[in-house]
Image (cartoon, helix red, strand yellow):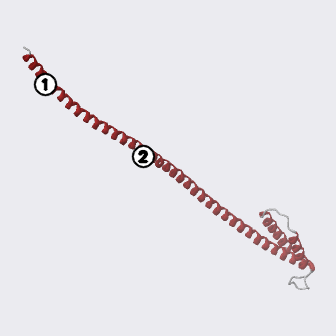
Amino acid sequence: MSSLFHRNKDSTRTRKSQSDSPPSSPSPTAKNLRHERLARLDSGGSNLSSTEPSSDRAAARASAYYRRENRLASLGSKTEDEKEKDFKKLYESAFNENEKLKNNLREAHLELVDIKAKLERVAKKQDQSSSQSGLLEAEKREKRALERKMSEMEDELKALTDLKSDNQRLKDENGALIRVISKLSK
């Protein structure tokens, strides 16, 4: 009776551990291995003596089978849990790495936009300075031309003052000559 209890207890453990794992159909290889194990258990592969009744031997074999299946199931579920944890860790690390890369990409993009803006400002300044230098050159040429004109006008002004003084002298001489002629003609 106790062996039946163990068998039922072990079978419920097996069911629980199997229900914990995701449902999947066993592969043909797994089915063959299970059948081979059952066949070995039935053929008397246990350490029980031959004096025990066959029903006790069968119960002991079944109990040993269920215990072994439970151990294998628990080992399998542990490895699946460990694999799941490993995959979760891998996923988290990959996710974190992706986030870091995204942040680096955003920072690089912002830096690129900033550099482009600075480059445009420098280019505008160079254009302005080149246009200003062009304007400065034009202003310099204009200034030189105006200076030349001013020096020419100063020369003309000197000539004019000389002409005025000559004109005034000639007027004075003319007036004196008119007086002399008028005295002589009287």
Q: Residues within 10 Å of mark 1 (few under 14, many from 20)?
A: few
Residue under pointer 1: 173
- N-terminal of the pair, mark 1 or mark 2, is 2
Front residue of this view, candidates 59 and 159: 159
Q: Residue 47 lies in what quarter of the image? A: bottom right
Q: Which mark is residue 129?
A: 2
Q: Residue 47, relative to residue 97: is it above or below? A: below
Q: Residue 78, relative to residue 142: is it above or below? A: below
Location of the C terminus (image quadrant): top left
Q: Residue 65, relative to residue 138: is it above or below? A: below
Residue depicted at 12% across the width and 19% down the height = 178
Left-right relation of 94 to 156: right
Left-right relation of 43 to 74: right
Extreme top residue here?
Answer: 186
Percent from the top left, x then y, of residue 5? 84, 71
* Callout 2: SS: helix
Comparing labels 1 and 2, the label whose residue is closer to the camera: 1
Q: Residue 126, relative to residue 90: is it above or below? A: above
> What is the distance, in whole Å, between disc 1 and disc 2 at their CAs?
63 Å
Residue depicted at 77% across the width and 63% down the height = 20
* Callout 1: SS: helix
Q: Amino acid at mark 1?
A: Glu
Left-right relation of 31 to 74: right
Extreme front residue here?
Answer: 185
Q: Amino acid at mark 2?
A: Ser
Q: Residue 146 lies in what quarter of the image? A: top left
Front residue of this view, candidates 184 and 45: 184
Front residue of this view, candidates 124 and 99: 124
Front residue of this view, candidates 16 and 158: 158
